[in-house]
Image: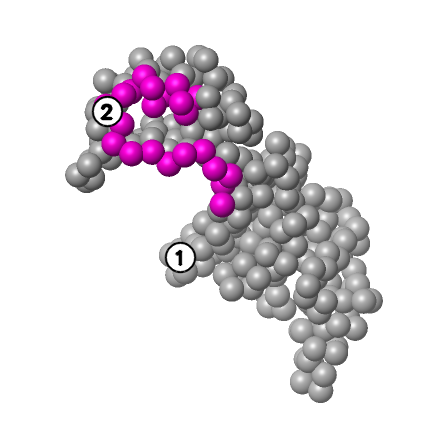
Amino acid sequence: MPTAGIAIIGDEILSGKFVEENAAFLIGELRGLGVDLKRIVVIPDELDDIVATVRELSARFDHVFTSGGVGPTHDDVTMVAIARAFDTTIVRQPELEQRVRAYWGAKLSEPNLRLADVPASAELVYGKDQVWPVVCVGNVYVLPGVPALFRRKFVDIRDRFRTEPVTIARVYIDADEGAIADDLDAVVAAHPQVKIGSYPRFSEKDFKVLVTLEGRDAHDLAAAFAMLVGRLGARVVKTEAPAPAGA
C-alpha cells in the first residue's frame, strides 16, 4: 500500500491567522485513492525547517505533498527549500516562463516571473489544466496554499496516485469499551491485517462506542466484520457494511 506524508507550510497557519483546510481535504482524497497517509506536519516559512522536513518525508514515504509558500513574494521560499532538499538549484523553466508571460500578457510584472522558477530536476505534471502544472521533484508534489487552488490542483492529478481502495466498515455498540474489549481482542487476533479502532462516544443517545474496521483485503475485512457483529449480538445498535472508502 503506497504511503504519503503532508507538509503544511506557513506562518499564517501556526499563528492562527487562517484555519488549515488542505490537510483535512487531502486526508479524504488519499483514503479514497487507497494511499496510506502516515504523517502530517505543520511548519513555518523557514528555509532550513522546510529543507529538513522535505528530506525526512521524502525518504520515509512514497508520496509527499506540500502546501503553501509558492508565489512571487518574499515569504514564498518553498521552491528554494525543495531544491536544497534534493541538492539541486533553482532555474527559470522556459516552458513555464512562456505560460506565465502568456497568462499575464501586458500586465506582467517582474515578480510574476518567479512563478517559473523551479528546482532544476523538476517535472511539470499536467492534468486537465494545461496552463498551470503541478511541480514535482522526486516524490514531492508542490501545491499552493490557497485552499481553492490546492483542491483544484490535486483533483487535476489525483488519478496519478490511484490504487486499490481501502475497505471500511463501522459497528455502533450500546456497551462500554471495557465490556467489549475481549471481543475486540479476539477479532484482532483472528484478523491481524484488519485495522480495528474503538472510539467511545459520550454525547450520543443510541450508542456508546463506535468501532471501525479498515483493510485492503475486502474478504478478510468482511469476515472480521461478521465475526465482531456475531460476538457482540444484541449490543450492536447498527452497522455500516463493508464498502470501499470514498464510495
Q: Is residue 239 magenta?
A: yes
* Figure quadrant of the N terminus: top right
Image disc number at residue 19: 1
Image disc number at residue 235: 2
Which residue, as the protein is rendered here, is positioned at the far left? 205
Q: Is residue 111 above or below residue 222?
A: below
Q: Is residue 191 above or below residue 45?
A: above
Which sits in the foreground, 8 or 34?
34
Sequence order check, earlier mark of 1 and 2: 1
Which residue, as the protein is rendered here, is positioned at the far bottom? 106
Query: Going 70% across and 56% down the picture, which residue do you hit?
Result: 135
Query: Going 76% across and 53% down the picture, which residue do you hit?
Result: 122
- Separation of disc 1 and disc 2 at Cα? 39 Å
Which sits in the foreground, 192 or 148?
192
Q: Position of residue 214 (x, y in %)?
A: 47, 30
- Looking at the image, residue 220 sits to the left or right of residue 71; the answer is left
Q: Amino acid at mark 2?
A: Arg
Query: Going 66% across and 37% down the picture, which residue do you hit?
Result: 62
Image disc number at residue 217: none
The scheme the figure's colours follow is: one colour
